[in-house]
Image (spheres, grey):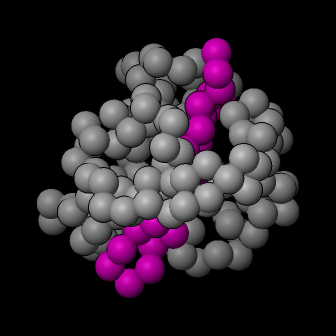
Amino acid sequence: MEDVKIRRMAKEDIDAVMEIERDCFTVPWSRNAFLMEIEENKFARYVVAEKDGWIVGYGGMWLVIDEAHITNIAVRSAYRRQGFGRKILSEMIRVAEEEGILRMTLEVRRSNDAAQRLYQEFGFRFCGVRPGYYQDDHEDALIMWRENSL
């Protein structure tokens, strides 16, 4: 994983991010949504994982006062289970802590055991459910929180 670069998402990355969105989600975010996030939302922080000049994943969060809400983490299906998600999440936590964020939260599909295990490895704990949260199939979201170690 030493040849993987995690860096801030740029406008030029959006085509690759849109490919990842279509690969990973049944209801992908729009191109404009990402443009707004990286160019206009002062609370948003987005990163990409790059391997050999190829964007293989990304992650985003909103920083509000002393909390971070992880909006999305996605890795191309061909690159899953290789540590890219772990590397992205680690960088997001580093950025949040650097900016004085005390707590982080996210929602994860009830059926996404792999993501839940990853988040638990980083200290996220279950604290609630959002019934029918996902619009594509009305699956429940599990709410997870993490206390940062500032």
Residue at left 36%, top 74%?
67
Which residue appears farthest toward the left when viewing the image? 149
Q: Which residues are magenta?
A: 55-78
Is residue 144 something that shows in the picture?
yes
Residue at left 58%, top 18%?
79
Is residue 106 something that shows in the picture?
no
Observer-nearest of 96 and 74: 74
As for residue 67 lying within the magenta part, the answer is yes
Q: Position of residue 81 (x, y in %)?
A: 47, 18
Q: Position of residue 88 (x, y in %)?
A: 45, 40
Q: Position of residue 51 (x, y in %)?
A: 57, 23
> Relative to residue 47, is residue 32 depicted above or below?
below
**Quadrant assignment for the N terminus:** top left
Q: Position of residue 60 (x, y in %)?
A: 55, 55
Task: Find residue 41 and report its image quarter.
Answer: bottom right
Q: Is residue 57 left or right of residue 26?
A: left
